[in-house]
Amino acid sequence: MFVAEVIMRVKGVEVDKLKTLELEELEFVTDPKETTRLQGDLIILGQMPPISEVEFPSPPPSSNVMSPETLPARYAFSHSLARSSALAALETSLDSYLHSVSRLPSTLGTTGKPGLGRKELRMKLGQLMRFRQGVNLGRETFGDTPDLYWTEPVLEGYFDSVSEALEIKARADSVNAKITYAAELQGLLRELLAESSGHRMELIIIALIAVEVVIAIIRDGPELWHMVAGAPEANGEKNDPVQ
């Protein structure tokens, strides 16, 4: 409902749209007699301690709207779910990338060549750089608690409870391990590019030298031939006995 009523209807809300939607779902119930918490895979929205510094806007009046007192808790729970979805999208893209380069080790082992052109190798390097940027410099740094919750221990508890239930930290560590492997592959690709460039430069230099030799032969060939062929004749004349 949120996707249909807000994200798809309000222009500018959705940034960097994904080709495939990633969904995270947890059941929830509202019970004013219970304490707001995550119990197993169920979110219970009920009573919660007051928050101190962060001010949340009041929801629009509606007969179907949930209690405004639970809005901060709903935000914290939703924020953690959104982080899990963002991580899932990154996991899917990274798995596709690793699958696309999975044959490189075997190809290198059998042929000594990566099996990719220079342009394709550069594109793979660029894709890997985007993954690194997404994990370390993106809007969500998956290993850290957002600044908003530093002064609100209650909201931080809600956020962390969903993060632990969805194993966000373990999944982020797994993504980093895969990126480390991909970084090693990136180093190998760079070496291959440098080696290929070196070989190409050597061939170009050899070709230039060969062209220069051919030009010199064409330009100075007759003179060189005269010098080489004329020297024995001159020596023969000097060695003739005087009649």
Image (cartoon, helix red, strand yellow):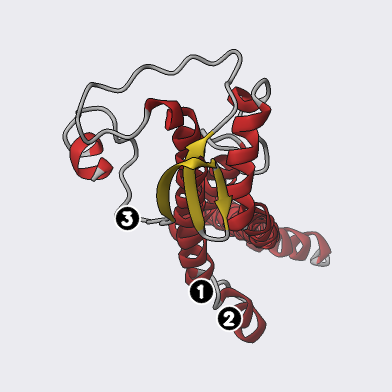
Q: Amino acid at mark 1?
A: Gly
Frontmost of labels 3 and 2 is 3
Number of numbered labels in the structure image:
3
Residue lying farthest bottom?
110
Specify which label sits upstream in the sequence, 1 or 3. Answer: 3
Picture quarter with the C terminus: bottom right
Assess disc 2: are there few (<14), some (14-19) or many (≥20) residues with their C-alpha within 10 Å of its C-alpha: some
* Tag 2: amino acid: Thr
Looking at the image, is mark 2 or mark 1 earlier in the sequence? 2
Residue corresponding to mark 1: 115
Question: Image check: 62 left or right of 226?
Answer: left
Q: Which mark is residue 21?
A: 3
Q: Nearer the viewer, residue 6 or 65?
A: 65
At which x and y percent is residue 39?
Answer: 57, 55
How far across and how far down the image is residue 45, in percent?
46, 42
- Dot 3, crowdedness within 10 Å: few (<14), some or many (≥20)? few
Give the position of the N terminus as an image quadrant: top left
Choose the circle earlier in sequence order: 3 or 2: 3
Q: Mark on residue 107?
A: 2
Q: Quadrant of residue 103 in the image?
A: bottom right
For residue 41, say whether it is visible: yes
Helix, strand, or loop for circle 3? loop
Q: Residue furthest left?
A: 9
Residues 236 and 106: in front is 106
Element under disc 2: helix
Q: CA distance from mark 2 to mark 1?
A: 7 Å
Residue at 19 percent of width and 38 percent of height: 5
